[in-house]
Amino acid sequence: MAKTTIRYICQNCGAESLRWMGKCANCGEWNTLVEETVTKQEQHKRTWVKRSTPLRLAEISTEDQPRFSTGSGELDRVIGGGLVPGCLGLIGGDPGIGKSTLLLQVAGKVAEESGPVLYATGEESLAQLKMRAQRLGINSQELTVVSESSADQIADLIREKKPKLVIVDSIQTMFVDEVPSPPGSVGQVRESTGRFLQAAKGTGTAVLLVGHVTKGGSLAGPKVLEHAVDFVLYFEGETHTSFRIIRSVKNRFGSTHEVGIFEMTETGLQEVANPSQMLLAQRPTNSSGSVVVPCLEGTRPLLVEVQALVAPAHFGGPPRRQTTGVDYQRFSIILAVLEKRCGYALQNQDVFVNVAGGIRLEEPAVDLGIAVAVASSEVNRSVDPYCAVIGEIGLSGEIRAVRGIGQRLQELARLGFEKCIIPKPNVTGSEPLQVVGVSTIQEALAQTIGSRR
Ligand code: TYD
Ligand code: MG
């Protein structure tokens, strides 16, 4: 017998509550609880359950798991070497960033190279899909498309046709009949994902789900989804620029540090052979507040431009602090270190920091780049355009060592940089370009923009 109750479900962590609360008791986020009608079937009729036999690890064969390519070397690398049969993956990102484009390209390639593919769309009409496919030059006989929002229907199709790959675009448009709440709600997303998981594991079909990101920057019901799937990839980049980064945030089949770099072109997403060059193409030379940082994304060095603007704050309000692409907490610490250790007076100044190209930098190794950019803008003196900086800043203003310095310096040398300010402990004496080892932020500033006034 089915029983219907009202529950409040947190959009952030999926926790259930019997009454509405302003703050989720589980994850502590505010205003994330939404009302949902939950229908509970009489549960736990266990008569049908067949017990699984425990196996020794040695008895389990991994040989029947050959990976197959997505048709994109960059994407394969992010996933850990290609798709695994029976895997369930989630690709998230802002609307319009290119999720459908990428997955249609993947669908076309897999259909050509590996086997039948089903593209199920709950968002677009088949005619729209066809137009996009024509634009992308996709015309494989093995690619079938269906306009369908019922998770059960798609799961049945998977069991019946057993394609190599199924794309579900998007999970927020899918529904199952038993859940009374509308598509896109946590309950629907959770149940639909469950259906796809069962179908994928049961047939060995790889299933890729598209997920939209909500305003706050998280997938609707993200924890619910992230628990269930094998890997989660996020699209980064700004929709108005053509640069796109795909980052894995969870991966049961490989590392989570890898990124894939793409450019949105007239004919879909193309891999970028030389991302550092592309990122630095529009860099202003001899302009204060701009500095190049050799970042390391996974195993991949990437030269990015960090920009800062320090301008007098207007009277009447607190000075503005804004960052795009770097962590706000770290930025605040760096400003405090500049004020306390280097005598910069920023309390009456607006400070903005931006990473060119819409990339998000998470490693603390970019600290020194942020500090130098801010100081350079404040004193209005530019940094030598052929000099880069790298290093983590500690609270006493000390510069700490970073990982992978060799790769970072190689990339700088390859792109014609002449000099890099690096943490002293990282100096080896066999660098491919001139390096200056520094132990404190003061030394680093003296080397890049000279003494303060
Ligand atoms: P889309 O894949 O529809 O985004 P999502 O599924 O993440 O919402 O991408 C939409 C944008 O991509 C749209 O603004 C047009 C652009 N685009 C191109 O620039 N080139 C192309 O070949 C295609 C198909 C789309
Ligand atoms: Mg789309």
Image: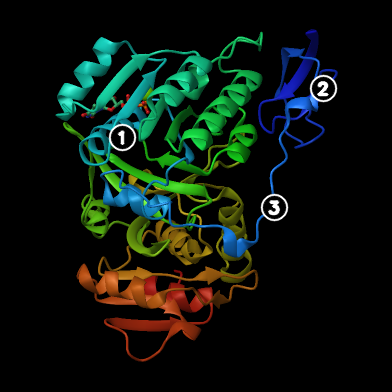
Residue 32, position as x, y percentages in the image? 70, 25
Give the quadrant of residue 23: top right
Q: Earlier in the sequence, mark 2 or mark 1?
A: 2
Instruction: Using a 10 Å C-alpha cutoff, classify the residue at mark 3 as few (fewer than 14 neighbours), some (14 to 19) or many (20 or more).
Output: few
Could you give the CA–CA distance between mark 1 and mark 3, rounded to whole angstroms? 40 Å
Res. 169 visible in picture = no
Q: Give the residue type that dot 1 points to.
A: Leu
Q: Earlier in the sequence, mark 3 or mark 2?
A: 2
As displayed, is residue 336 above or below residue 140? below
Q: Is the residue at mark 2 in contact range of ligand 1, meaning its CB lies under 8 Å from it?
A: no
Give the quadrant of residue 345: bottom right
Q: Does 32 sit left or right of 403 as displayed?
A: right
Q: Earlier in the sequence, mark 1 or mark 3?
A: 3
Q: Which residue is mark 2?
A: 21
Instruction: Using a 10 Å C-alpha cutoff, classify the residue at mark 2 as few (fewer than 14 neighbours), some (14 to 19) or many (20 or more).
Output: some
Q: Give the residue type that dot 2 points to.
A: Met
Q: Which residue is mark 3?
A: 54
The residue lying at 32 percent from left, 61 percent from top is 303
The residue lying at 32 percent from left, 90 percent from top is 430
Query: What secondary structure is found at the residue carrying circle 2?
Result: loop
Which quarter of the rendered picture does the N terminus lie within?
top right
Query: What secondary structure is found at the residue carrying circle 3?
Result: loop
- Residue 102 marker: 1
